Image: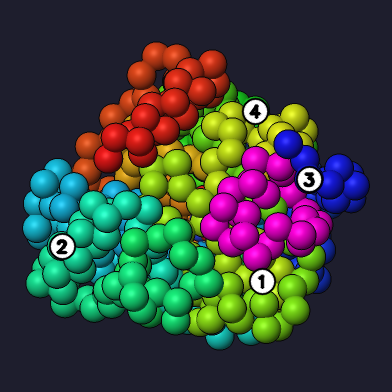
Amino acid sequence: MLESPQKIMTIKETNYWLQTGAQPVQGLDGPPPEQVDVAVVGAGFCGLSAARTLAKRDVRVAVLEAEAIGWGASCRNGGMVLTGMKLPVPTLLARYGREAVRRMYAASRDAIDLVEQIVKQEQIECSFSRCGHLEVACKQAHFDAFVESAAEIKREFNHHLRIVPNCELDAEIGSDIYYGGMVDETSGGLNPAQFVAGLGHAAQCAGALLYDRARVTRISSVWKGGKQGFLLETSRGRINAQEVLLASGAYTTEATPALRKKIIPIGSYIIATEPLPADLARQLSPRNRMIYDSKHFLYYYRLTPDNRMLFGGRAAFFPESQNTVRASAELLRQGMIRVYPQLRGTRVDYVWGGTLDFALDVMPHSGRIDGMHFALGFAGHGVAAATWMGAQLAGAICGDPDDNPFSRIPFPGAPIGLRSGNTWALPLAGAYYRVLDWLT
Ligand SMILES: Cc1cc2nc3c(=O)[nH]c(=O)nc-3n(C[C@H](O)[C@H](O)[C@H](O)COP(=O)(O)OP(=O)(O)OC[C@H]3O[C@@H](n4cnc5c(N)ncnc54)[C@H](O)[C@@H]3O)c2cc1C
């Protein structure tokens, strides 16, 4: 199996992005204050974006993070800032109707604009660029669906996606295993660890109180003068809040059992190679796109600013652990070589994993649960969407009209077995997606 055991032995089981100069955000010392207007649970893109917006609007806000600031999926992802949603547009239209999907699609574009605006306004050095994304077709039928989908997206949303037939694909990617592609120039890429750290610093500068190592263990309703408030018990003391915003993503715990039942935590893993010579990097990805394929059990990949190939996928369905991370390294390397045989002799330097928050209907959701605000279900589209959703929820808390298209759709719970974070059924989900990939 292993072509060179020494290569694998040299892999660092650590997140490459954290080695690239992201300035860690120091949380505050001491216990949290007795009372704030809003307590945010979770310091990822969603929680920090919400805290930044709230603090800029003079709301007294505290962010409570169980680990380090930005520790969750937000510092571990592929850094792809993508338009659209996880589900294909025809499925969305059939499910939600034209008007709702128009607003969802517009929100996905606004989300990228918001990321770009925050990066500029807060001067966050995170290598953000509008490099576009490329989706590649693994079967002829997938390419045919791209053509239909691009026409529908143009018609419905006046948004242009460029179809790349197989004979022109080498201008986009140095791989000959695909049947064609589809490019969206609106999408971008960034260094997620630097972006989430920048968001944290911006929230702090605006006046938000950030607490790391402050795990929320229990939240109870408190009624005062006929108004609902909340008491949060954390590993660093108690805090009262008028409003609570749950931004705990795939790492949601038993402290909020109703929310935990709604999500399916699914592992995703990434390897990063040694830096590649510039001409090889250009051959693999001539336009430096954010690339992903058309399978359910998909691969996603891109070059890093220092020309490493960063290659991710759902090598194991379980949330990340030392075992799944280790096992994923070779699985992903084999996947990478199938796409790019040119990388057969290339050293893999890093491997890491993170957990995605999938809702059963594969959609993002926001709204209220047990009187608290929440947003989750971003799956593999959270860099832009979670940042946008955090800002939207902050606006709603401040009394802005709620025009968030994701707060109005039904939010189904996960079936028994996938509920409560139980993971025994995840290999079944993995097998199901592999069969779908084989059949469709
Ligand atoms: C490997 C991987 C690759 C990905 N690639 C991409 C990509 O390229 N593009 C894209 O758009 N999306 C991608 N995603 C998805 C994206 O990273 C997420 O959707 C996004 O980061 C979610 O942000 P969040 O703020 O909702 O959650 P998170 O960043 O996960 O933050 C939640 C935080 O809540 C904290 N928390 C949980 N419970 C408690 C508690 N009780 N008390 C206190 N704190 C708590 C956790 O410690 C965690 O830090 C990827 C995800 C992974 C894992």
Task: Tell whether 89 sits left or right of 222.
Answer: left
Q: Which mark is residue 423?
A: none
Task: Tell whether 168 sits left or right of 105.
Answer: right
Residue that appears at 27% across and 40% down: 440
Q: For residue 365, say whether it is visible.
A: no
Q: 168 or 188: which is nearer to us?
A: 168
Which callout, 2 or 3, points at the residue further toward the start of the chain?
3
Asked whether 226 falls inside the magenta stretch, the response is no
Residue that appears at 77% across and 56% down: 348
Q: Position of residue 312 (x, y in %)?
A: 59, 52
Q: Which mark is residue 217?
A: 4
The crowd level at tag 3 (other Cα within 10 Å; few <14, some 14-19, many 20+) is few
Separation of disc 3 and disc 1 at Cα? Answer: 25 Å
Q: 129 or 205: which is nearer to us?
A: 129
Q: Which residues are magenta?
A: 329-351
Residue identifier under label 3: 3
Which callout, 4 or 1, points at the residue further toward the start of the chain?
4
Q: Overall secondary structure of the magenta stretch?
A: helix
Q: Which mark is residue 304?
A: 1
Q: Amino acid at mark 2?
A: Glu
Residue identifier under label 2: 148
Q: Position of residue 408 (x, y in %)?
A: 22, 46
Q: For residue 167, say whether it is visible.
A: yes
Contact flag, marks 1 and 2 (Cβ < 8 Å): no
Separation of disc 4 and disc 3 at Cα? Answer: 46 Å
The crowd level at tag 1 (other Cα within 10 Å; few <14, some 14-19, many 20+) is many
The crowd level at tag 4 (other Cα within 10 Å; few <14, some 14-19, many 20+) is some
Which callout, 1 or 2, points at the residue further toward the start of the chain?
2
Separation of disc 1 and disc 2 at Cα? Answer: 32 Å
Q: Amino acid at mark 4?
A: Thr
The verdict on label 4 being within 8 Å of ligand 1 is yes
